[in-house]
Image (cartoon, helix red, strand yellow):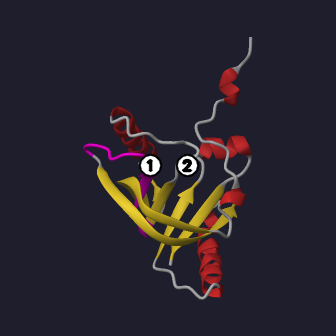
């Protein structure tokens, strides 16, 4: 008998070439916005917020196209972050938002403890393109279980310019 539990993953395998050193334009890209509590940027209730959000999306049949799904994080406080889950349609009862703009992207791989170093690298990258950062978003490409399964922990930093 085959053990399919070993192969189960919830996040699609990430292709860094699609996102590394690219310019991405969003025009009214639909998201639902949630708030995660954190302690020095370490999320405390991320799993429960994600479950609640995914349940809302599923109940509304709003769809998450997993090949184009992105989860953005706005690390705007030591004590919390706004997260944005991409959806295909608006979700009743959720905080529906749209994001527009031009974004420069860069892919990083490794431990989250390197985030400060990655932000500095991103600032240099954007500066070298003669652009100024308006806002940074972090795209966590896989959950911790899938990152372990795939052997890579990719994070994409999107700089709105």
Mark 1 vs mark 2: in front: 2
Residue 159: in magenta span? no
Which quadrant would the N terminus be assigned to in this image?
A: top right
Query: Could you tell me which residue is drawn at 45 percent across and 66 percent down?
Result: 75
Task: Choose between 47 and 126: the one closer to the eye.
Answer: 126
In the picture, the disc for residue 46 is 1
Residue 158 in the image: state x and y as whole percent: 55, 68
Task: Choose between 25 and 150: the one closer to the eye.
Answer: 25
Q: Quadrant of residue 157?
A: bottom right
Task: Choose between 51 and 99: the one closer to the eye.
Answer: 99
Residue 37 in the image: state x and y as whole percent: 38, 56
Q: Secondary structure at mark 2?
A: loop
Specify start and end residues of the magenta stretch as a single range: 75-93
Residue 90: in magenta span? yes
Q: Is residue 54 above or below residue 117?
A: above
Residue bearing the label numbered 2: 68
């Amino acid at each position: 008998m085959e053990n399919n539990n070993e192969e189960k993953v919830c996040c699609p395998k990430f292709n860094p070439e699609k996102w590394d050193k690219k310019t991405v334009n969003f025009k009214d890209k639909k998201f639902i916005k949630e708030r995660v509590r954190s302690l020095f940027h370490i999320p405390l209730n991320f799993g429960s917020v994600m479950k609640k959000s995914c349940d809302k999306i599923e109940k509304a049949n709003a769809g998450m196209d997993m090949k184009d799904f992105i989860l953005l994080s706005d690390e705007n406080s030591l004590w919390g972050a706004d997260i944005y889950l991409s959806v295909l349609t608006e979700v009743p009862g959720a905080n529906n938002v749209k994001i527009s703009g031009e974004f420069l992207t860069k892919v990083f791989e490794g431990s989250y403890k390197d985030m400060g170093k990655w932000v500095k690298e991103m600032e240099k990258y954007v500066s070298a393109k003669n652009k100024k950062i308006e806002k940074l978003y972090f795209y966590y490409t896989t959950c911790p279980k899938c990152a372990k399964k795939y052997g890579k922990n990719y994070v994409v930093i999107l700089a709105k310019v």
